[in-house]
Image (cartoon, rainbow, N blue to C red):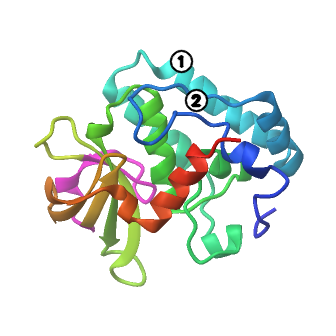
């Protein structure tokens, strides 16, 4: 199935009957997938696609009462199971930021898809958007050196050292213990920051300045 477009068979219906209700909405919104969406995923990608999406819904439903640390672990482990596939091979595009539904249904993604999936999952679990940032870094130990990479960071407090949720290293660690990663910028539904240090950054403005993020959120917010 790799290398084939997600649309039109699943269509825009799958690309957004997932409701958190938007990346800028209040925290803790439910994820909702219609039976039509699940059937479309199953038709396009097989029964396992439905099972992955249902498992995601169940994770969110059963995880809301867990501690913050437990929620981080659940989201990190769940999306790290998805096989790594380049955008070129998987979507036929040089760079494509997939929605969590697209990633799970197609059972493939790359680093930004993992980070995005974890971000929306944690929002649905009730983690505040102010605690989460999708962070663009340079991975110093990858080949080639300083390879572009993306992780999700969680801030226990506004000025605290963030924790890193990553697919390269599945153990959740403070950023101070990830000397292999050099932060460049970070963003969430509320803003865009230029990283000057591992635990802080300079606010540049809205995250809508990032074209791929704007495209992703437009797919999420589109009404039919």
Magenta range is 163-183
Q: Mark 1 — residue?
A: 62
* Label ID, residue 31: 2
Seen in the image, is 126 located left or right of residue 79? left
Q: Is residue 180 magenta?
A: yes
What percent of the width, then of the height, locates residue 99? Answer: 59, 50
Q: Nearer the viewer, mark 2 or mark 1?
A: 2
Q: Is residue 24 magenta?
A: no
Seen in the image, is 21 located left or right of residue 104? left
What percent of the width, then of the height, locates residue 83? Answer: 63, 57
Of callouts 2 and 1, the N-terminal one: 2
Q: Does 33 sit above or below residue 222?
A: above
Indicate the secondary structure of the residue bearing disc 2. Answer: loop
- Disc 2/disc 1 C-alpha distance (Å): 13 Å
For the C terminus, give its image quadrant: top right
Residue 101 in sight here: yes
For the N terminus, give its image quadrant: bottom right
């Amino acid at each position: 199935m790799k290398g084939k477009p997600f649309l039109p068979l699943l269509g825009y219906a799958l690309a957004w009957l997932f409701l958190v209700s938007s990346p800028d909405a209040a925290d803790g919104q439910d994820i909702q997938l219609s039976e039509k969406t699940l059937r479309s995923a199953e038709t396009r990608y097989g029964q396992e696609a439905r099972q992955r999406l249902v498992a995601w819904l169940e994770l969110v439903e059963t995880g809301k009462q867990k501690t913050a640390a437990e929620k981080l672990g659940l989201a990190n482990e769940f999306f790290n199971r998805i096989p790594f596939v380049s955008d070129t091979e998987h979507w036929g595009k040089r760079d494509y930021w997939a929605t969590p539904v697209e990633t799970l249904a197609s059972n493939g993604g790359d680093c930004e898809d993992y980070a995005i999936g974890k971000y929306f999952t944690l929002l649905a679990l009730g983690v505040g958007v102010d605690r989460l940032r999708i962070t663009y870094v340079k991975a110093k130990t990858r080949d080639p050196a300083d390879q572009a990479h993306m992780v999700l960071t969680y801030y226990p407090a506004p000025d605290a050292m963030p924790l890193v949720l990553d697919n390269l290293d599945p153990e959740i660690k403070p950023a101070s213990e990830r000397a292999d990663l050099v932060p460049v910028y970070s963003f969430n539904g509320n803003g865009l920051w230029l990283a000057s240090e591992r635990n802080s950054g300079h606010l540049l403005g809205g995250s809508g300045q990032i074209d791929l993020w704007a495209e992703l959120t437009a797919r999420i917010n589109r009404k039919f």
